[in-house]
Image: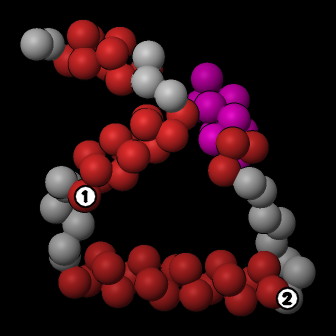
Amino acid sequence: MDAATVEREALALTAAERALLADRLLQTLDWEDPDRMEAWGREADRRLEAFERGEMEAFDGPTAASEIRRAIA
């Protein structure tokens, strides 16, 4: 089965099924680089602190994804 077929079939799934599939696929990637994980932890802390100080806005997932798609289109 080629990637285009897999993509077409995946997009036919419900939103919940796609979310579970996406999570499972992400788990298969090599994210275990300790330096990268530490850097992301620091960045997450920095962003949370900025949000708590009122310096950063928060958006729900669908809104954030829509904004990202619009920005890269």
Residue 26 is situated, as x and y percent measured from the top left of the image, at 29, 52
Query: Is residue 71 among what the camera can see?
Result: no
Residue 36 is situated, as x and y percent measured from the top left of the image, at 29, 76
Q: Report helix, strand or loop for mark 2.
A: loop
Q: Left of 42 or right of it: where is 63?
A: right
* Residue 68 magenta-highlighted: yes
Residues tagged 2 and 1 counted as in contact (Cβ below 8 A): no
Residue 44 is situated, as x and y percent measured from the top left of the image, at 55, 80
Residue visible at 62% across and 31% down in the picture:
69
Q: Crowding near pointer 1: few (<14 within 10 Å), some, many (20+)?
A: few
Which three-letter amino acid code belongs to the residue tagged 2?
Answer: Arg
Residue visible at 54% across and 34% down in the picture:
15
Q: Is the magenta stretch mostly helix, strand or loop?
A: helix
Indicate the quadrant containing the N terminus: top left, top right, bottom left or bottom right.
top left
Q: Report helix, strand or loop for mark 1.
A: helix
* 2 vs 1, front mark: 1
Q: Name the residue under label 2.
A: 53
> By what rule are the colours in the image chosen?
secondary structure
Between 11 and 53, which is closer to the camera in this rendering?
11
Which three-letter amino acid code belongs to the residue tagged 1?
Answer: Gln
Q: Left of 63 or right of it: where is 26?
A: left
Between 20 and 4, which is closer to the camera in this rendering?
20
Between 60 and 30, which is closer to the camera in this rendering?
60
Q: Left of 20 or right of it: where is 45?
A: right
Q: Left of 47 or right of it: where is 15?
A: left
Determine the image quadrant of residue 46: bottom right
Q: Crowding near pointer 2: few (<14 within 10 Å), some, many (20+)?
A: few
Residue visible at 39% across and 82% down in the picture:
39
* Magenta span: 64-73
Q: Mark 1 points at which residue?
A: 27
Using the numbered discs, state the Cα–Cα distance from disc 2 to disc 1 in whole angstroms: 32 Å
